[in-house]
């Protein structure tokens, strides 16, 4: 990806990432057992045109996430399910791996200081062999929060560059034995490692920005940072279910999903209903019928926060104290 805003009213061709995959063993070998979590972002398709509110969708074969930006503020939510990546591995998985399965995993976090009121989520690999990527990201976010930056994108760029340096140093020192090669970048020329997503207010300005960590050849990691429109309604999850609820132009919605539909989205409450409706649809029996794999890995405790200039970062439905952290891997 290149810098600048990547979501437009035209056909969108970029993607940010396909999935957040928690590697409990800390290894990246093909035989490992992975846990899936719900902060994926992938190639979006525009759901409506000609309005000030941009309706975006990102398809993923993982689980669900939603972000809505309005004139009042932002809403961000995710489900709480963390489960075995492949059910066929269940009988061979260790007790430690199985014990990490949860319906109450936390995947949304906050950064609040005098200049920043942000929520953030990581999408990708939490660990790379013995390198604790999520913990390194948290350290760099905290360290660089004390420095002065003009915009959220510049802050995120500084964080991403420092994290990339640490990744490459860990690779040279063989702390990281092998970079993951599970998901291609949008160009098909490289591989995705992880994404870091920030949303909220930076020096009073509504902001939504994403950093992507990738590698081309298995030797050196790279990063790229993009700003997104803060007035977006973004859903990520099953494209099959999305099309049933919010079909592409020229197609009719599936009437069986009518209870999950929320449009237009004009307020924070609308945004909450919009995201909750999509997550509920993905985890419903109808969702099971249309996309059984998405249904299997979506569910559990939905945690949701609102971010406003007046009230800051505020949990509407808080997580249940089971955060995804690299230290728990």
Image (cartoon, grey):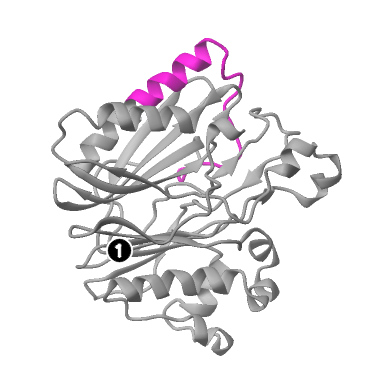
Residue 216 lies, in percent from the top left, at: 49, 29
Furthest residue to the right? Answer: 91
Residue located farthest toward the front when viewing the structure as drawn: 321
Residue drawn at x 27%, y 74% is 267
Please provide the residue range marked out in magenta.
162-187
Taking the view exactly as shown, the residue that stands out farthest to the bottom is 255
Q: Residue at x 75, y 43 (%)?
A: 98
The quadrant in which the C terminus is found is top right
- Which of the pair 59/190 is nearer the observer? 59
Q: Is residue 10 visible?
A: no
Q: Does residue 317 lie above or below 34 as drawn?
A: below
Residue 200 on the magenta span:
no
Instruction: Locate residue 145 relative to residue 204 in the image: left or right.
Output: right
What is the x, y in percent for residue 105? Answer: 56, 50
Q: Nearer the viewer, residue 209 or 117?
A: 117
Residue that mark 1 sits on: 232
Name the spot of residue 45 as percent of width and height, x first: 42, 64
**Residue 318 located left or right of residue 3:** right
Residue 121 x/y as whole percent: 42, 46
Q: Is residue 180 magenta?
A: yes
Q: Is residue 72 above or below residue 171?
A: below
Residue, x 70% and y 29% (percent of image)? 29
On the question of residue 249 being in view, the answer is yes
Badge 1 local density, few (<14 within 10 Å), some, or many (20+)?
many
């Amino acid at each position: 990806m290149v810098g600048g805003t990547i979501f437009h009213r035209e056909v969108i061709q970029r993607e940010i990432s396909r999935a957040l995959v928690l590697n409990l063993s800390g290894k990246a070998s093909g035989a490992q057992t992975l846990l899936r979590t719900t902060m994926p972002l992938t190639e979006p398709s525009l759901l409506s045109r000609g309005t000030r509110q941009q309706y975006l969708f990102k398809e993923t074969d993982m689980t669900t996430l939603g972000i809505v930006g309005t004139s009042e503020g932002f809403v961000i939510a995710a489900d709480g399910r963390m489960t075995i990546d492949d059910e066929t591995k269940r009988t061979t998985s260790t007790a430690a791996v199985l014990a990490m399965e949860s319906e109450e995993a936390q995947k949304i976090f906050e950064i609040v200081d005098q200049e920043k009121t942000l929520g953030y989520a990581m999408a990708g690999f939490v660990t790379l062999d013995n390198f604790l990527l999520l913990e390194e990201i948290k350290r760099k976010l905290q360290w660089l929060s004390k420095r002065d930056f003009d915009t959220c994108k510049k802050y995120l760029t500084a964080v991403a560059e420092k994290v990339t340096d640490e990744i490459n140093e860990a690779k040279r020192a063989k702390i990281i034995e092998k970079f993951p090669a599970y998901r291609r970048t949008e160009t098909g020329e490289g591989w995705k490692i992880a994404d870091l997503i920030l949303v909220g207010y930076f020096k009073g300005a509504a902001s939504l920005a994403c950093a992507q960590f990738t590698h081309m050849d298995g030797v050196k990691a790279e990063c790229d940072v993009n700003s997104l429109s803060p007035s977006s309604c973004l859903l990520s999850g099953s494209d099959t279910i999305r099309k049933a609820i919010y079909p592409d132009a020229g197609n009719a919605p599936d009437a069986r999903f009518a209870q999950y539909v929320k449009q237009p989205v004009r307020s924070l409450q609308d945004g909450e209903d919009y995201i909750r409706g999509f997550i509920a649809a993905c985890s419903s029996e109808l969702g099971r019928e249309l996309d059984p794999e998405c249904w299997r890995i979506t569910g559990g405790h939905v945690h949701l926060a609102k971010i406003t200039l007046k009230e800051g970062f505020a949990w509407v439905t808080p997580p249940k104290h089971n955060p995804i952290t690299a230290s728990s891997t």
